[in-house]
């Protein structure tokens, strides 16, 4: 008889905590990560524009992925381009 143990023999990787929240967006760069779905650019762009208007954020930086299921090409460059990001899915 085989006995199967559902508990992994190696411990799970440590959970990475979320980055701390910014106090406000004044002077910050808002990053838009568009997943290339229809209307995602319009929706995310408008959200970013409202953030700039209402919070005093400095600018909007836009990135567009080649497709919804494809990761952003250069993660480090994308991450370094803005202080906060807005992303989502639209159809």
Image (spheres, rainbow, N blue to C red):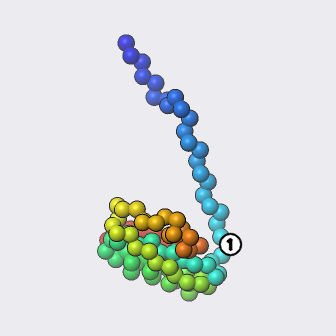
Which residue is pictured at 45% across the width and 82% down the height?
Answer: 46
- Coordinates of residue 78 in the picture (x, y in percent): 50, 70
* In the image, farthest residue toward the bottom: 53
Nearest to the observer: residue 66 or residue 47: 66
- Coordinates of residue 18 in the picture (x, y in percent): 60, 58
Query: Which residue is identified by label 1?
Result: 23
**Can residue 74 be seen here?**
yes
Which residue is pictured at 57% across the width and 78% down the height?
Answer: 29
The quarter holding residue 36 reads bottom left
Q: Quadrant of the N terminus?
A: top left
- Coordinates of residue 17 in the picture (x, y in percent): 61, 54
> Is 45 on the left-hand or right-hand side of 39?
right
Nearest to the observer: residue 67 or residue 5: 67
Nearest to the observer: residue 12 or residue 38: 12
Please rate how many residues cluster around mark 1, counting C-alpha atoms within 10 Å: few if below 14, some from 14 to 19, many from 20. few
Which residue is pictured at 35% across the width and 65% down the height?
Answer: 68
Nearest to the observer: residue 89 or residue 15: 15
Work out whether 32 lies above or below 9.
below
Work out whether 31 lies above or below 54.
above
* In the image, farthest residue toward the right: 23
> Is 55 on the left-hand or right-hand side of 38?
right
**Can residue 84 be seen here?**
no
């Amino acid at each position: 008889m085989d006995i199967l143990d559902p508990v992994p023999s190696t411990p799970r990787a440590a959970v990475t905590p979320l980055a701390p929240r910014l106090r406000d967006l004044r002077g910050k760069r808002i990053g838009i990560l568009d997943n290339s779905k229809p209307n995602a650019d319009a929706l995310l762009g408008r959200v970013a524009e409202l953030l700039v208007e209402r919070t005093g954020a400095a600018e909007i930086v836009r990135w567009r992925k080649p497709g919804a299921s494809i990761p952003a090409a250069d993660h480090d460059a994308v991450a370094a381009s803005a202080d906060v990001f807005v992303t989502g899915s639209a159809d």
